[in-house]
């Protein structure tokens, strides 16, 4: 079964056989890796493709530069990207730079993690958590890691 994956570099949707996700797939257009082992930056320009053009779940970390817990959580989220890709796409939303999205998603505290499937929010977790707790929470949401 083929899966749609949005390229984090050029935003083109790629079809990749599900059995080849762990083979380091590259974008058919820009030839960059579809998984970089780091969170993708969320902007108003790439939001729709990120949420709607990925057949794998997308986890978004909503953060701000001035937030101490956000800064403490950043290395954990980076490690999660390296560990959980390609079964999960990880992305970061700077709530100060993208206030419209933060308002639309009703972000009341940061860090806030939002899990999306097929463009729809399915779960939300507030606060910084250690990697094992993040993994457990994702598994409770049905994400196969």
Image: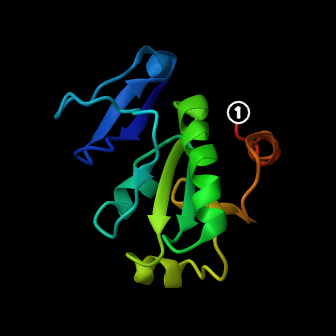
Is 118 situated left or right of 69 in this image?
left
Residue 82 is situated, as x and y percent measured from the top left of the image, at 54, 32
In the rendered view, would you say 145 is above or below 44? above
Q: Is residue 94 visible?
A: yes
> What residue do we see at 28% from left, 66% from top?
45
| Residue that extends furthest to the left in the rendered view of this protein | 29
> What residue do we see at 68% from left, 60% from top?
122
Q: Quadrant of the C terminus?
A: top right
Is 134 situated left or right of 65 in this image?
right
Is 94 situated left or right of 11 in this image?
right
Residue 43 is situated, as x and y percent measured from the top left of the image, at 35, 66
Residue 21 is situated, as x and y percent measured from the top left of the image, at 47, 22
Question: Which quadrant of the structure image shows residue 9?
Answer: top left
In the rendered view, would you say 140 is above or below 110? above
Label 1: how many Cα within 10 Å (few below 14, some 14–19, many 20+): few
In the rendered view, would you say 143 is above or below 99? above
Is 47 situated left or right of 106 in this image?
left
Question: Which quadrant of the structure image shows residue 63?
Answer: bottom right
Q: Is residue 88 visible?
A: no
| Residue highlighted by disc 1 | 144
- 29 vs 4, nearest the viewer: 29
> What residue do we see at 46% from left, 56% from top?
51
Coloring applied to the structure: rainbow
> What residue do we see at 50% from left, 78% from top?
102
Residue 72 is situated, as x and y percent measured from the top left of the image, at 64, 56
In what element is the residue under mark 1? loop
Q: How many marks?
A: 1
């Amino acid at each position: 079964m083929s899966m749609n994956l949005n390229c984090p570099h050029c935003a083109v949707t790629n079809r990749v056989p599900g059995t080849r996700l762990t083979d380091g797939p590259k974008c058919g257009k820009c030839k960059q890796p579809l998984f970089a082992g780091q969170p993708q930056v969320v902007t108003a320009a790439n939001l729709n493709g990120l949420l709607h053009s990925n057949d794998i779940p997308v986890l978004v970390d909503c953060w701000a530069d001035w937030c101490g817990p956000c800064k403490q959580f950043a290395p954990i989220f980076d490690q999660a990207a390296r560990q959980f890709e390609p079964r999960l796409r990880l992305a970061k939303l700077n709530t100060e730079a993208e206030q419209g999205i933060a308002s639309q998603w009703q972000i009341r505290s940061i860090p806030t993690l939002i899990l999306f499937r097929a463009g729809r929010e399915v779960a939300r977790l507030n606060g910084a958590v250690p990697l094992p707790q993040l993994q457990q929470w994702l598994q409770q949401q049905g994400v196969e890691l």
